[in-house]
Amino acid sequence: MLDATLLALPLALVTLGLAAACLDAILGGARASAPFGEVARLLVQQRRRTLLPDTLLLRIGVVSLVVAPVLAGIVIPLADAPVADLAVGIVWFNAMEVCVWGSLWLTGWSVNSVYPLVGAYRFVAQGLAYELPHMFALITVALGAGSLRMSDAVQAQQGLWFVVWMPLAFLIYLVSALAMAFWGPMSQPVSDDLAGGVRAELSGPDRLLFQAGRYALLVVAAAAAVPLFLGGGAGPVLPSWLWVLIKTTAVLGLLVWIRHRVPAIRMDRFTQVSWLVLIPLSLVQLLVVGIVVV
Amino acid sequence: MGVTEWLLRRAAGHPRPFVVSAEHGTRARLLGEAEIARRRWRPAEPAGEANLLLVCGAPREEFDDAIRTVWDDMPGPRARVDLPGDASSGSIGQSLDRAVVHLADKDAQWRDAAARAGKPWSPGEERHSPDADAPRHGHGSHATHGQEHDEHEGGHHEHHMGNPGGLPMADRGPDRDGLSLDRLRVPMGPILSDWPCGLVVESVLQGDVIQEATVRWMRSGESFWSEPWDRAAAGHPVTRAEAGRRRAAAHLDSLGRLLSVSGWSGAARRARTLRDRLLADVPRDALAAPYRSFERQVRRSRTLRWMLRDVGSTEDGDAVSRLEGWLTWTRAAIESLEDETPLDGEPPARNVLHPGLLVGVELASARLIIASLDPDPAVAHA
Amino acid sequence: MAAAFWILAVGSVAAGVAVFVVDSMARATFALLASLLAVGVAFLLIDLEYLGVLIILMMVMEMLIMAVFMIMYMMNPAGLMPMKMVHNNRGALIISGSVFVLLAAGILLTSWPRRRGEPPADPTHELGLAIMGQKMLVMMVIGVAILATMISTVVLTTHRGRYDRYGEDLKRRRPLDPGPGSEVAKGPVPPAAEHHAGHGSCGSPDPREDSR
């Protein structure tokens, strides 16, 4: 049903994104309707312009931050089938979320300002730190499923969900989901100690697109955990699309909650852990899975 | 027309306030923050997100210029509230209500925007005092990053490459790895989120590592936190309970700032709520348990320890030891909230920010060092 | 299909030309990225989905890292100064033109084999078998070994060793790194004359100056 899923994807992204924003507002002590007020405010806000910006790159950066998660989401099975069931769905998902590196760097660079530039470079450092463990986690899933197709990964979890016998890969995936959406502990690129980091000079419609892209990225990262580790739409009584929704909401809620629970992690200290601890752990997990599968 | 008004009204119901504390503004700032928390507004942590500027106290001229820069750079619709240092809770509430009405007033906002139209900033014009620019808006800096100086081609490389847009390009200098990178002059402060208001750290950055730093203040010391001790020294009867309450609130204020800069917004909010309740004269029994659970949560956090370890190491310890010191002192102060014996002794000393601590440190660590010291000019002028 | 191919081909070449035409190093890097992404998408047209998506993935990451180095090492990274960023125009054009003609001639004049039979159900799998055949395990081990080698190389190039970080008898519990900005960690700085890695890619500040 191509048409239904084609409409369902952006609808799901917007709805879940707003839900995540509302949960974040409540946990942050504000009212639940705060995100709607913020959207209204950004729609009427003046756009800010700095001295000698690179406008072309800025537009590309901000728009690609919205487009990348949508493209990444087309391979995620929403009920039984995704919008486009690519044979290399897992690699496609990875490729689209890597495009966010480009978006953030371009946004931070183009506004010609110190704090956004520092934020952009922080994100590049963050990307280097999280990407390898993330890729190994995805490879582990592909190995367990014997295929790079997301729906094959769902099929392979008929008996036992991957989260049960690949727990390390799931944890590493969650950490990298936080990092890819620069959320919570991994929000140094847009953190308040840099006056907002990459989005410091954005205002009005630019900021709205940026925030929308960030939440869409968070939703897609949470949604991808479902077919990869949590069995897709499998579950007893309810239809599969409802199970997907429930599981996605659970992971999304966890990710939003973590933001208020854990301090921000700086990359100069995290890189050591990421490369010296997470990569060997993910390789060990890969080895275990490889032995089981073979 | 209807759409814009409707959006404006929705937006005005959720303003994003940013609080600036100037000379003698601490009392008003604390009341303002408590009022904002009571209304469940989301403070705009970076000033760039704000549309409501709350100025507490009476800023001196240089600081006033900085505030005006922040105000000028705030995109419309916007509102500004100036609170005198002795504002009461009720008057603060009324001012905030008036600001909300102003934010929803389409005609006023259009007039405001029209008055600002067509005046883009350029470096040539004398905009108040240039070194008071909050770096947040970044006009005063060029984003050229590092460049390598090619030794072979000697001669025809000039150091001053001209002025695109009227701003000189950054000069180069050696850095800690032996490269020759751009040196960017960035004044941090005086107006940043979770920053000791009025502090300016004039830094020279290479990348995001501070190579040189000078510290100066745009306001004089704040006597609000040491008020009980000052009154006791002047002869008035002051109990230890009062002093303990003020001291606990001071430490919780600093803790809130440090936790917020560390990125732990949940704990920062708890600290600030406890501070507001302390200042609202909530009795000890209602405070002891929440404080103890907050303290447990912060002490147990291994991530926080990991991030703050060896940050700003002096002979007295690093950021972790300062954090723990504040927690211990606050607990002791809360324990003494029923102690009616008269007060004697010195007010607790504030830490001093030595610029040498910031040299060689990257921006995030510098912010953490300053937050963990939470300096105040009263000590510097003593 | 043919239309898509020609659009991608022209786009790729145009982006490649843009790399040398634009003044801003950031734009040059991303023009290069656009060119390489067009190549990656072209792979998708011939059903090599895995290779195509992999090219997109790798190129984005690599061009970001290259952007960091371009901004660090090149003069005029934002293109704000009117500066000639290319050297030796005529020589370069002659060489690249002749190489292009050579390659184009080779492509057009080779007798390419005709397709026999159907494309396989899983081209990625077949491609893997064809390239690596029976040596798949060796290849995977070598892949991990290459990763280990790269990491070791980076570790070896730092001029602070174990004894600097852990103390003379390797007893220190936590390593002493420049991160916290301690005075000790600011080690011996090599003299500035050492870093003569300039490979002539700096732009000439004088637009009228002829390239040497």
Image (tube, coloured by chain):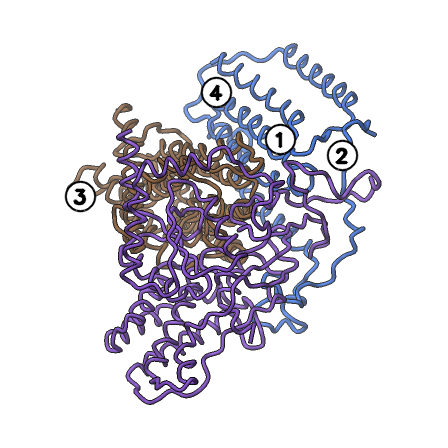
Chain colours: A brown, B purple, C blue
Circle 1: element type: helix
Secondary structure beneath label 3: loop
In front of the other: label 1 or label 2? 2
Which residue was labeled with disc 1?
C28
Which residue does the numbered mark 4 point to in the structure image? Answer: C45
How many other residues sit within 10 Å of disc 3, few (<14), some (14-19) or many (≥20)? few
User: Three-letter amino acid code at disc 4?
Assistant: Leu
Residue picked out by circle 3: A236
Chain for disc number 2: C
Label 1 marks a residue whose chain is: C
Give the Cα distance between marks 3 and 4. 41 Å
Q: Amino acid at mark 2?
A: Pro
> Which of the two discs, 2 and 3, sits closer to the camera?
2
Q: CA distance from mark 4 to mark 1?
A: 26 Å
Q: CA distance from mark 1 to mark 2?
A: 18 Å
Say which quarter of the image contains residue B2: top left
**Residue C205 disc label:** 2
